Amino acid sequence: MKEYKRKHERYDSLNLLSYVCIDSDGKEWSQGMGRTLNISSSGMKLETHEPVDTRYILLLSIGIEDDVVDIKGKVIYCNRGAEGKFESGIEFKHVKPDALSVLNKYIEEFHKQFNK
């Protein structure tokens, strides 16, 4: 069994988001709403009502406090989680510097709270 090691520590976090699934040619296949279950500067666990196919790239718009962060991510896995919802591991790709700045500021606040 392949072992995945995360680059950054993840923090439990519930943030609403919207997503668009695109293929490698940029063709849109589906879209939906979900929420983060945990997040780091390199990825997150996404909860959705519908499964998200691992062959797609996600265009994510995540609500983080008063900001909306747009990030592109790769679906690593998708499994049925608690209460019949789906949980997907997302690895962030091509994060713009301004989005990364907001994300890192948010994560730093979690780090301060949980490492007192």
Image: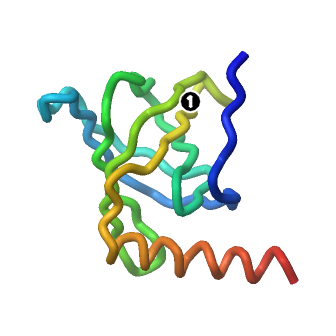
| Residue 38 spot, x, y in % from top left | 63, 53
| Residue 111 spot, x, y in % from top left | 72, 75
Task: Tell me: residue 1, above or below residue 73.
Answer: above
Q: What residue sits 32% from the left and 28% below the top?
A: 56
Q: What amino acid type is highlighted by mark number 1?
A: Lys
Residue closest to the eye, 22 or 6 = 6
Q: Tell me the quarter of the picture where residue 16 sits.
A: bottom left
Q: What residue sits 55% from the left and 76% below the top?
A: 106
Q: How many marks?
A: 1
Circle 1 is placed at which residue position? 85
Q: Residues within 10 Å of mark 1 (few under 14, many from 20)?
A: some
Q: Tell me the quarter of the picture where residue 110 sits.
A: bottom right
| Residue 93 spot, x, y in % from top left | 37, 50
Residue closest to the eye, 6 or 20 = 6
Using residue 116 as the reference point, say whether residue 45 is left or right of it: left
Task: Tell me: residue 41, above or below residue 75.
Answer: below
Residue closest to the eye, 26 or 21 = 26
Q: What residue sits 53% from the left and 34% below the top?
A: 88
Colouring rule applied to residues: rainbow
Helix, strand or loop at label 1? It is loop
Q: Quadrant of the N terminus?
A: top right
Q: Quadrant of the C terminus?
A: bottom right
Q: Residue furthest right?
A: 116
Using residue 63 as the reference point, say whether residue 36 is left or right of it: right
| Residue 50 spot, x, y in % from top left | 42, 27
Q: Residue furthest top?
A: 1
Task: Tell me: residue 49, above or below residue 93.
Answer: above
Q: What residue sits 57% from the left and 44% below the top?
A: 45
